[in-house]
Amino acid sequence: MRALPVGDEALLVEVASAAEAQALHAELLRRRAAGALTVREIVPAARTVLLDGLADPARWAAELTTTRVPEAPPRAREVIELPVRYDGPDLGAVAGHWGVTEREAARVHAGTEFTVAFCGFTPGFGYLTGLPDRYDVPRRATPRTAVPAGAVALAGPYTGVYPRSSPGGWQLIGTTDAVLWDHARVPAALLAPGARVRFVPVEGG
């Protein structure tokens, strides 16, 4: 673990893996809830966690780099279920990469419980982990200029859902009608780091 100062009131903590980043994020949230950490924001990423609004970043840098973080973060109680039609244009390519039929690829994906590791790229977009390493898939060689909102996609070890239409190079395997980002909702994002997610096949998928 390495802690790097970012300006006068922030700290970027680097760890070795996505699992460690999730565990550290959960531990820092626990400390803040217990009143042992005063910080404005705690922002996880693939292998880092940013703490913004620290009164004494140097003190926390020394403490965090000598603290053993729990191996696994506490699990959220509720599971967010996202209805999905497995009708994506890249489902066949993903199934071929996995060495299974399209139906089996959909079954594997729907049978997995995912965790939101972190959010980014665009508001409401969560990077979901849960599939075993053997199901990693490469990004498309040529990204699409427009991916529709609600597209369920895979890239590397991650599953994601596009909250709105945007360019993208992920493999599209399905579609959901779930609203991932809504300004009128509190919170606006349906998915947040640490959330548990399942994809539930619906008719036509």
Image (cartoon, helix red, strand yellow):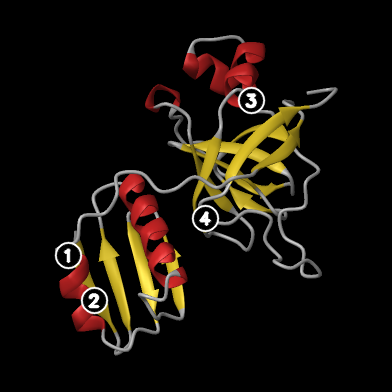
Residue 110 is labelled as 3
Q: Nearer the viewer, mark 3 or mark 2?
A: 2
Residue 193 is labelled as 4
Callout 3–callout 4 Cβ contact below 8 Å: no
Q: Amino acid at mark 1?
A: Thr
Label 4 or label 1, whichever comes before in sequence order? 1
Assess disc 1: are there few (<14), some (14-19) or many (≥20) residues with their C-alpha within 10 Å of its C-alpha.
some
Q: Amino acid at mark 2?
A: Trp
**In x, y percent, where is residue 127?**
52, 48
Label 3 or label 4, whichever comes before in sequence order? 3
Report the side of 52 relative to 199 (left or right).
Answer: left
Label 3 or label 1, whichever comes before in sequence order? 1
Q: Which residue corresponds to mark 2? A: 60
Give the quarter of the figure containing the N terminus.
Answer: bottom left
The structure residue drawn at horizontal position 74% and vertical position 49%, both measured from the top left corner, is: 149
**Residue furthest toward the right?**
203
Q: Nearer the viewer, residue 35 or 97?
A: 35
Secondary structure beneath dot 4 equals: loop
Residue 65 is labelled as 1
Q: Nearer the viewer, mark 3 or mark 1?
A: 1
